[in-house]
Image (cartoon, rainbow, N blue to C red):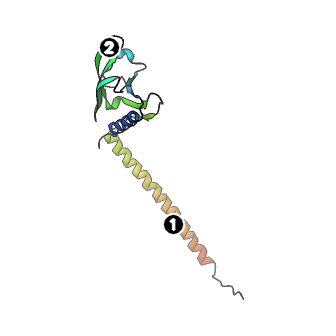
Amino acid sequence: MKSKTPYLLRAVHAWIIDNGLTPYVLVDANYEGVCVVEDHVRGGKIVLNIDAEAIDNLCLDDDSISFTAYFGAASEATQIYVPMGAVKAIFAQELGDGITFEEEAPRSLAKKLSTAAKKKILQKVAVKRSKTKDKTEKTATEKKETKPFLKVVK
């Protein structure tokens, strides 16, 4: 199954643009394959303005974000490349509203977790069934011990 990150990123990007706001992305600059201007990296992260007025040739595909940016007074064109796994958040600069992305688990780990989760659910169901069975047995025993009676009301 494909990662949901690029789909969510494109959707939130469109939402920000449709509302006339400025889209920014938070990027893990230490992630393998990231190509950004090192001078602007702080604490291993960089915030990039991906508004159409600030950059050229924006490409938001399933694997990466790439565009041409202009940094500093010299305004030299710099090609920026960010693998999708390096994107930590997209947000509207004016509001700070957006979405964060967590690192996705490897598929093999996800399958193991899925199996473990299924086992846990089945265990809970088994416990609930045994409790329900015990209750119905107690109720049936209580009914047998008490004699039925009718009260005549006139």
Q: Which residue is labeled 2 in the image?
A: 75
Q: Secondary structure at mark 1?
A: helix
Amino acid at pointer 2: Ser
The quarter holding residue 70 reads top left
Q: Which residue is labeled 1 in the image?
A: 133
Amino acid at pointer 1: Lys
Of labels 2 and 1, the one closer to you: 2
Whether residue 101 is visible to the viewer of this picture, yes or no, is no
- Residue 125 locus on image (x, y percent): 46, 58
Q: Residue at x 45, y 55 (%)?
A: 123
> Compared to 144, does 117 lie above or below?
above
In this rendering, would 121 be left or right of 50? right
Q: Secondary structure at mark 2?
A: loop
Q: In front: 42, or 108?
A: 42
- Residue 142 locus on image (x, y percent): 61, 73
Looking at marks 2 and 1 on the same chain, the residue that comes earlier in the sequence is marked by 2
The quarter holding residue 33 reads top left
Q: Quadrant of the N terminus?
A: top left
In this rendering, would 53 be left or right of 148? left
- Residue 79 locus on image (x, y percent): 27, 21
Q: In front: 83, or 73?
A: 73
Report crowding for label 1: few under 14, some 14 to 19, many 20 or more residues within 10 A (C-alpha): few
Whether residue 21 is visible to the viewer of this picture, yes or no, is yes
Residue found at the very far top of the displayed protein = 74
Q: Residue at x 48, y 62 (%)?
A: 129
- Residue 144 locus on image (x, y percent): 59, 78
> Compared to 76, does 53 lie above or below?
below
The quarter holding residue 74 reads top left
Q: In front: 107, or 143?
A: 107
Report crowding for label 2: few under 14, some 14 to 19, many 20 or more residues within 10 A (C-alpha): few
